[in-house]
Image: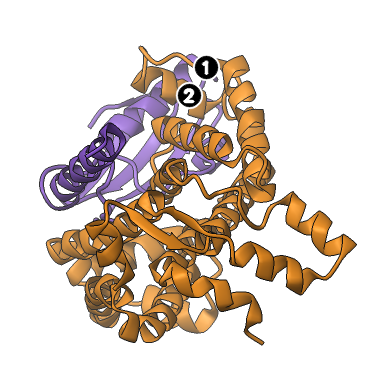
Chain colours: A purple, B orange
Amino acid sequence: MSVWLAAKWTVWFGLLLWMLRAGFFGPPRLFTWPMFSRVSECRMRLTDQAGRPINPWHDIVNQDPGMNAWELNCYLAYLREVRGIRASGEVTLVDHIGRQTLRVEAGRVVG
Amino acid sequence: MWWVEALGDGFRYPASPLPICLFRVVIAVAALYKFGYEHHRGAWRWFAPDSYVYYRYRREHPRFPVGPAGYRVLYLAKFAAAGALLVGVLPRLAALVLAGWFLFELRYDRKFHTAYLGLCSLFLVASPALGQALTYQTVLDAVAGDPAAVLRAEASRVADDAFGQLLLVLLTVQMYLSSAYRKLRSPQFMSGAALHAFTASLHAERHAQRFRDTWYPPLVARHFIDVPEPVARRRWRPAAVATVVLETVLPVALLVPAAFPVAAATGLLMHLAFTALLPIRLVPFSLATVGSYLLFIDPATAADWPSFG
């Protein structure tokens, strides 16, 4: 068997193992395809200091409707640090754990 | 079955390069479509210093620094690579650059269709036959002479390294089976709740979105979205179950020549239904997956394709 063919078989079996592991076991990663399989939703009703509504879709132009807690905090931090906006209002997060309504004051989640 | 023979002969299978070259064109078109609508949505500015996409990327990947200037270099490179792949200029290099872009894109916008396009591009690199048919030279020759004769001549060429094509077949099979398994294990999907939540959320936000992703007809909205949750779940459940069944059976049927025509037609209908959920965003994914069905056909038969009709 040539070195080239041995390399191909190595790649083939390596990928096969990787695909099996990622596709069927453990957390989602490359070669995992759980499209639409989880409820993930985030609805924001936020305003800035002057009471003007904030439309997150103007910033999150190409994202899914879902957002986890880390992403929500990241977005609020962006509004604070880059745009100088201290958002207030209410955010509803829905994920596999359930639905939770969070209160946001001065650009941070407070409860 | 050709793929069994090819595996048995160490990935060698003397056959027409037409299927893999057609798939090359499909991937290039899918990439150009994706880049085009994203450009329309302001992708050129997504790594501007004041953009949220860039802010989030820096927070998530502090040790993988691509700044606004680097992003724009990669941005131009991806268009050049997709164009080169389409016309068959240095196609393997173009596929490699495209794969690099998609893998980079996953760092700031994780989408399954991006991962699939990236892996398809990467596996195309493994095919030495990428430039043997359907290139700019095909167009020049067709303009200068008889297009049918040019296509017949290209289809009758012989490429004997099927490694890249087999990798792509493996990828599509794994993608469907993994997707079916993950969905089957998800009570939220099987109950219909995930499909309802996804469509209801995008439908509710449709006027707030600067660039809409959904256009559900009033009849669909009335029956599947704007209804109490238990009713919606019950109505979405058959679609969820059908998806899992189809995604399990489809890849197996695609591998069996006798079942291929029915499987391909069913897959096409299934992807049309998926695309209706996200009519803009899922077009490239559907193009690529349905395009990959070409690779399941015995490439030895492809020499006759230009004679059809």
State the image coordinates of residue B309 (x, y, percent, origin top left): 67, 87
Q: Quadrant of residue B110?
A: top left
Q: Quadrant of residue B73?
A: top right
State the count of labels.
2
Q: Are marks 1 and 2 on the same chain?
A: yes
Q: Is residue B68 left or right of residue B116?
A: right
Q: Secondary structure at mark 1?
A: loop
**Mark 1 near mark 2, Cβ–Cβ under 8 Å?**
yes
The answer to whether residue A8 is seen in the rendering is yes
Instruction: Using the image, determine if residue B95 lies above or below residue A65.
Output: above
Judging by the rendered image, the residue that carries numbered circle 2 is A79
Q: Is residue B223 left or right of residue A7?
A: right
Residue B216 disc label: none
**Could you tell me which residue is drawn at 47 percent across and 31 percent down?**
B100
State the image coordinates of residue B217 (x, y, percent, origin top left): 54, 78
State the image coordinates of residue B136 (x, y, percent, origin top left): 75, 50
Binning the other alpha carbons within 10 Å of mark 1 as few (below 14), some (14 to 19) or many (20 upward) gives some
Judging by the rendered image, the residue that carries numbered circle 1 is A82
The answer for how far apart the CA atoms under marks 1 and 2 are is 6 Å
Between residue A12 and residue A20, name the one nearer to us: A12
Between residue A73 and residue B120, name the one nearer to us: B120
In the image, farthest residue toward the front: A1
- Amino acid type, callout 2: Leu
